[in-house]
Image (cartoon, grey):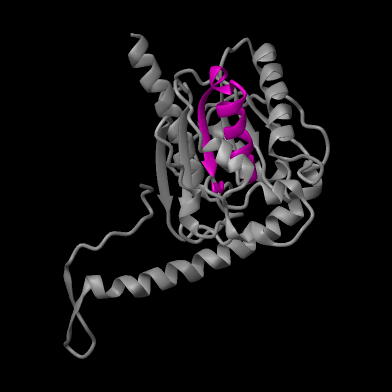
Amino acid sequence: MLPFVSRSTGVTLLGRAGRSVSRGSLLPVRALTGAVFGAAVEVAAIIAALALYPSGMGEERHTVRSRLGPPPDGTMPLPAIGADSPVLLVHGMGSNRAIFHVLRRGLRQAGFRRVTELNYCWLSNDVRSAARLLADEVERVCEASGHERVHVIGHSLGGVVARYYVQRMGGDARVHTLVTLGSPHHGTLAAMVPLPNQAIRQLRPGSDVLVELAGPAPGCGTRFVAFHSDLDELIVPTGNARLDHPDLQVSNVPVRAVGHVSLPMHGRVVGEVCRVLRDAHVAESLAAA
C-alpha cells in the first residue's frame, strides 16, 4: 500500500472542551479532507492535461536517455540494476503521450534511460487494433535497444490495450512487467454513455473484450501491477480497476484520494511505480545469481 494511506492508531486526544476524542473518530474528517484535496488536485490535473495535449500530438522522439537523479518521492535512488531495460508508456482515452510528462521524467530520474510512448488515436482504434499497434511498437523498441523484454505502463484504456496484447497476442514473451493505472479491468459504468465508439463499448462490464480477457491464460509470463484509487471518477465502481485473474501474477496497489487523470501525474504514485520496476530488476537479478 502506498505510504500516503493513513492508518488509525487508536490514540486518544484531548478536545477543546476537555472532551476525550478518539483518533479513530477523526478518520471520517480526514477522509473528507483527503477527498476534497484529491478532487482539487484532479481539477488541476485535468487543466494541465488539456494544456499539454497539443505538445503530445506530434511524433515522439524515440529512445530517451538522461542522467540519474533522485526519484520524485524524495527518496535516495536504489542501485540502477538493469536500468537500460526499455519502458513503454500507453495512454488512455481522450489523451495522448503528453499525459505522461511527469511519469516520464520520474522514470528517467529513477534510472530508466530508455523511455518511449505509443501514440495512437482512440477514436479510430478499438482495443484489439490498438493492441496490434502496441505489438509493432514493442518489436521496434526491442530491435532498437537490443533487449528481448520491456516494461509497459498503461493508463486507463491503455492498460486494457496492453493487457490484451500480453494475454491474447503472446505479448508475455516480450513484456516483463505490466503496470496499469486506473484501468477498468472489470469494466466501468461510465462507459455506458450512448456514444458510437467501439473502444468505449469495449470498456462496458461484460463486453466481448473483457469476457475474452477473463478467460484462461495459463503460463502467462508477465507480472501485473494494478493501481486503483478510491477517488477515480471514471472507474465505476472504483474497485473495477483491480485485476483479479487466477492465472495471472498480480499485485493490486490501492491508492487513496487520487483522481483518474491525476494518477500518472501524482508524485507519490510515480515514485511507487518507479520502485515497482526497480524491485522487479532486483528480484530478477537475485533469481539469476
Q: Position of residue 44 (x, y in %)?
A: 63, 62
Residue 142's quadrant in the figure?
Answer: top right
Q: Quadrant of the C terminus?
A: top left
Range of the magenta residues? Answer: 157-184
What residue appears at the point 38 percent right and 54 percent down from the top-left corner?
Answer: 4
Q: Residue at x 63, y 42 (%)?
A: 208
Q: Is residue 1 left or right of residue 115?
A: left
Along the line of sight, the residue nearer the viewer: 51 or 25: 25
161 above or below 207? above
Q: Residue furthest bottom?
A: 17
- Give the vertical position of 143 relative to 203 (above or below): above
Residue 34 image position (x, y, % from top left): 44, 67
In this rendering, position of residue 277 left or right of residue 97: left
Residue 140 position, x and y percent, is 71, 17
Answer whether residue 60 is visible to the viewer in this image: yes
At x 75%, y 47%, the residue is 198
The quarter of the picture where residue 192 lies is bottom right
Res 63 visible: no
Q: How many marks?
A: 0
Judge whether 188 appears above or below 122 on screen: below
At horizontal 59% and vertical 61% (from top left) the residue drawn is 42
- Position in image of residue 248 (x %, y %): 43, 31
Q: Is residue 26 magenta?
A: no
